[in-house]
Amino acid sequence: MKLEIPEPLRLDEEELRVALQRASMAGGKTGAAARKLAKLLQPHLMKEEKDLLQTLAALLPIAKGEITADMREIPPKTDRLKTHVFEMVREHSAIIEAARKLRRAAKAERKLKVAGFTERLLLRAWMDEVVFYPAAIVMGEYLKLTLKEKDDRQRPSSEPKSLKT
């Protein structure tokens, strides 16, 4: 199973990157604040892409009951996410602070599109924390159980069968 980021999330991610790039070129305090935000956001987005967004590609098949053996690659990703979720949330705190500084600068310089972008970014961080991270972790735990049960059913019993006399 090739884990590709679900199209709506991929498009949202791309729009965030483009908007941040444009904001970085805006000049003035807005541009400077956007560049500081980009330094925090880019590495964070790379981590999310690997262990979160790609994992969410399996959400729809799992919801349909289409569990496949190649989904075994998901639990290690979600275990990594679970291990690092507090670090990811801490990174969100720094990102949110930088986004708020960018919003203040953009409003002061009347760059309203940039201010609007920061609102979307803040909403996305919140959705990560209360929807996407928990959903991915639950998916991983569900797959661990489901795949183990599947393996147990397929494994021949090692106990000798009793002979009927």
Image: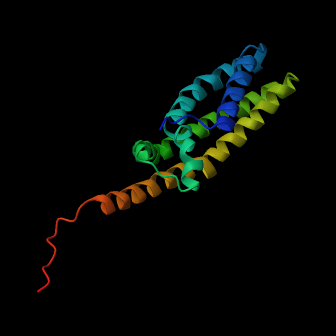
The quarter of the picture where the C terminus appears is: bottom left
Direction from residue 4 to residue 82 in the image, left or right: left
The residue located at (60%, 39%) in the rendering is 92
Q: Nearer the viewer, residue 93 or 165?
A: 165
Above or below for 50 versus 34? below
Q: Nearer the viewer, residue 28 or 81?
A: 81
Looking at the image, what colour scheme do you see? rainbow
Q: Which residue is situated farthest in the bottom direction here?
A: 165
Above or below for 33 versus 59? above
The residue located at (68%, 40%) in the rendering is 124
Q: Position of residue 60 (x, y in %)?
A: 60, 49
Picture quadrant where residue 159 is located = bottom left
Q: Which residue is situated farthest in the front direction here?
A: 165
Q: Position of residue 146 (x, y in %)?
A: 42, 59
Q: Nearer the viewer, residue 24 or 63?
A: 63
The residue located at (85%, 23%) in the rendering is 111
Above or below for 137 versus 9? below
